[in-house]
Image: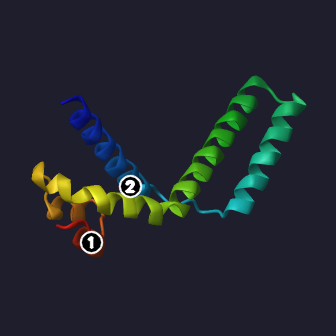
Amino acid sequence: MTTERGERRAETNTVAAYLDALLAPKPKRNRAALVKRRSELEARLDGNQDTALERLRLVQAKLDVDADLARLDDAERIVELEDSFVKVGGGWARRGISAAALREVGVPAGVLKRAGF
């Protein structure tokens, strides 16, 4: 029973990771531009020349860049995440999740076919 619950949790995490990567908005800048912007923000924050409100704005901008970099990482892993989804996705049909629902949230038909839907 505990092993079965652990397997279901792992399957759920796999599906969630794939859907999160699939549905995440794509950053408008490439990795090099994001890394450069992050460095600029860090340098400015290290300088301590700004007002408290400006520091707050800079910290938020740095967090936004970090989130964009994380989305790029997920986008680069999409093939790996998709393959993992294919291995466990068919089990979700037995849980009452339809192919139509998965298509509605953006899972490509070819991926669903590979997953056994």
Across and down, in percent, residue 68 comes to 59, 52
Residue 114's disc is 1
Across and down, in percent, residue 20 comes to 40, 51
Residue 23: quadrant of the picture: bottom left
Q: Which residue is mark 2?
A: 18
Please report the residue visible at 51 percent of the width from the left and 61 percent of the height from the top: 75
Depth order, front residue of 107/11: 11
**Element at badge 2?**
helix
**Element at badge 1?**
helix
- Residue 65 higher or lower than 86, as above or below: above
Q: CA distance from mark 2 to mark 1?
A: 15 Å
The reply, left or right, for residue 43 in relation to residue 1 is: right
Across and down, in percent, residue 15 comes to 32, 51
Across and down, in percent, residue 65 comes to 65, 47
**How many neighbours does mark 1 have within 10 angstroms: few (below 14), some (14-19), or many (20 or more)?**
some
Q: Quadrant of the N terminus?
A: top left
Please report the residue visible at 59 percent of the width from the left and 63 percent of the height from the top: 28
Q: Quadrant of the C terminus?
A: bottom left
Please report the residue visible at 57 percent of the width from the left and 49 percent of the height from the top: 70
- Residue 35 higher or lower than 4, as above or below: below
Instruction: Kindly check if marks 2 and 1 are in contact, taking CB atoms under 8 A apart as contact.
Output: no
Looking at the image, the residue that sits furthest to the bottom is 110
Depth order, front residue of 15/116: 116
For the residues carrying marks 2 and 1, which lies nearer the camera in this image? 1
Give the residue type that dot 1 points to.
Arg
